[in-house]
Amino acid sequence: MNIKEKLDILSDAAKYDASCSSSGSSRQGKHGNTSSSGICHSWTPDGRCISLLKILLSNVCMFDCVYCLNRRSNDIRRATFTVDEIVKITTDFYKRNYIEGLFLSSAVFLSPDDTMRRMMEVAKKLRREKGFGGYIHLKSIPGASDELVEEAGRYADRLSVNIELPSNVSLNKLAPDKNKEDIFGSMSYIGKNYLENKEERKKHRKAPTFAPAGHSTQMIIGASPESDRQIVTLSSGLYDKFALKRVYYSAYIPINEDVRLPEPQIITPLLREHRLYQADWLLRFYNFKADEILPVTAPNLDVDFDPKTAWALRNYHQFPIEANTASYEWLLRVPGIGVQGAKRIVMARRHTSLDFSHLKKMGIVMKRARFFITCRGHILDNLRTSPQMIAMTLKPKKSVEDTQLLLKI
Amino acid sequence: MKNLYKKTYQYDGTNAGMLCTLADAIKRGEMPTFQTANSVTLNFAEHTHIVDTDEERSEVFLDWLKEISDEYSVRMLIYILMSDCIGYEDTLLKYCLLLRKHENNTMRMQANPIVRSIHDRCYKVTKEIHRFKGLIRFQELESGKYWAPFEPDNNIIVALIPHFTARFADQKWILHDISRQIIVTWDKQILYNKKAADYMKDEKISDAEKDIQQLWQTFYKSITITNRINPKLQAQFMPRRYWKYLPEVE
């Protein structure tokens, strides 16, 4: 099999991995460097960005996870890259500025340790022999030995362990060869090392790095029955407990037929994935708690409204707030005001008293914000109203599914 | 009587010329209309002030702005100068006057229409710079150099130099702005060349290049999730006018 065929098979097999981030690390190599802001190099016709060469080392798998294309029992073309082949493609692509670096994952062939060792060797060769300074994200194989993970972390910018499914019950049912202990064990080992290394590098700036861009995980949404509340609560716990940088959500795409899976005609809407990312953003950048976004009384995210608007409508008694005096934290909670907008308001109001025309020019989305703020004590157009009226005004006229796809970032 | 006819300042259309024009307007305390040398003149000659372009004086003017305000505010101005500023001189003059009045507080006046306009325009330029850090595509030449043709909206080639110098220090490369015919080359040092055609005339694409491009196209094709095709979203991130030099989208 030539290298082109292998690349065809092993990038096709990697395409459902959501992560594409190349940010958070800053490294200067002999050949190449990483930019801490991250850079996208292209966008595929599905609208997703390409930042990294995203491939599997091998799709020969000893596991039989129900939802996965590469499961043992599927009759598909199988291929395995050699270490040198991956090193060559990576450097050839990098030199031409096609990519920021490599995202290497793999099916589990032979054993978790054998797989992990081969992946680690790719990263080692790139760094040691090629002086490669580009971004490297390695997927850590649950059950691989700590020594191998530790060594991989020395060469990689990011490590990740896929949690796969949002609950233990679903994991047992859909990924019978994987177990929770291995997954959380790896995650906590990486999290601990990452935090320790960060501390160490504060003391000794030249200390070797361990996955300086942190670690992340991914779960499949819609292949199992968990509610959004369960999912977001789980994410919130992962961020707190394991110091994760990102949780990725991947709307389930039916690939295999199996009684344990939802009927193939039941398609998880991309909108659900999008709403989960919005909720995730509220956790990480807007100081929201999982309980606020999804209380027991509303365990699933609203189809018609983004999670912040939905929260504000449920808590309408706390609004409106005054743009000229409200705290930064409260501005962040107003639908239509983002992190940039809140910062601009705080800066601008020191120099002038703000009115609605100012806010509009500063990039505040007045369509939503107007119901929740006052300027100099006034409500826009004396628009006194109720949460029910607001909900009616803001409810999307077009099918949400069509428009939301455009908004997904 | 003095303000009855608005003065017209005429300059040669270059950035240095415009900076001298702004300097003159501030010095004389006037709010003129602006004109470049090749535009049609309708004003009476006695109301037209013809500005001499002087590189050194334009530098002195920028230094003065830095002194009265701060590095950041002037850097925004420099980014804006990479865009086509003809027709925008008036806002730039008002911006300079704001800098003089409010010094380094200016950029915090986020509600001020001039500051907003400067911000937005600057954002367009820096956004394009960031985009091209990703969208630049090098091709290997027979001479072993890596050549990247591109056509940005703004004249951003200089702003890309630090990024590619740090990234590909061990590689000989050429950035080539096709529409402006400007070339920047790197071989352990930066050279700026205005005669792009002369420089490139003996260069040829290497034989191996086609194979690598095909490999890249293979990757691009198989990484796409075909049951989620969404060309509108794709074009939103990667506008079609930038596709010409991307080997993956053909």
Image (cartoon, rainbow, N blue to C red):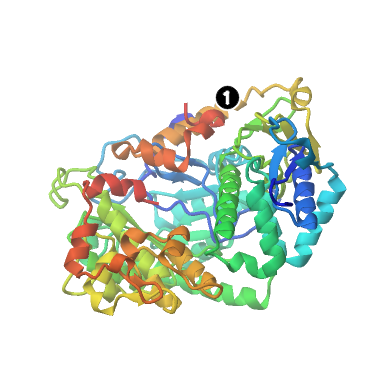
- Give the vertical position of B51 relative to B123 (above or below): above
Q: Toward the viewer: A236 or B8?
A: B8
- Tag 1 subunit: B
Q: Residues within 10 Å of mark 1 (few under 14, many from 20)?
A: some
Residue A79 in sight: no
> In the image as oriented, which residue stretches furthest toward the front?
B1
* Residue pictured at 45% horizontal, 51% vertical: A20
Q: Nearer the viewer, residue A4 or B153?
A: B153
> Residue B106, percent across and down?
63, 66
The residue that label 1 is drawn on is B210
Residue A338 appears in the figure:
yes
At label 1, the amino acid type is Lys
Q: Position of residue A116 (x, y in %)?
A: 46, 55
Towards the viewer: B45 or A164 = B45
Corner quadrant of residue B237? top left
Residue A164, by quadrant, is bottom left
For the residue pair B221 and B161, the one nearer the viewer reads as B161
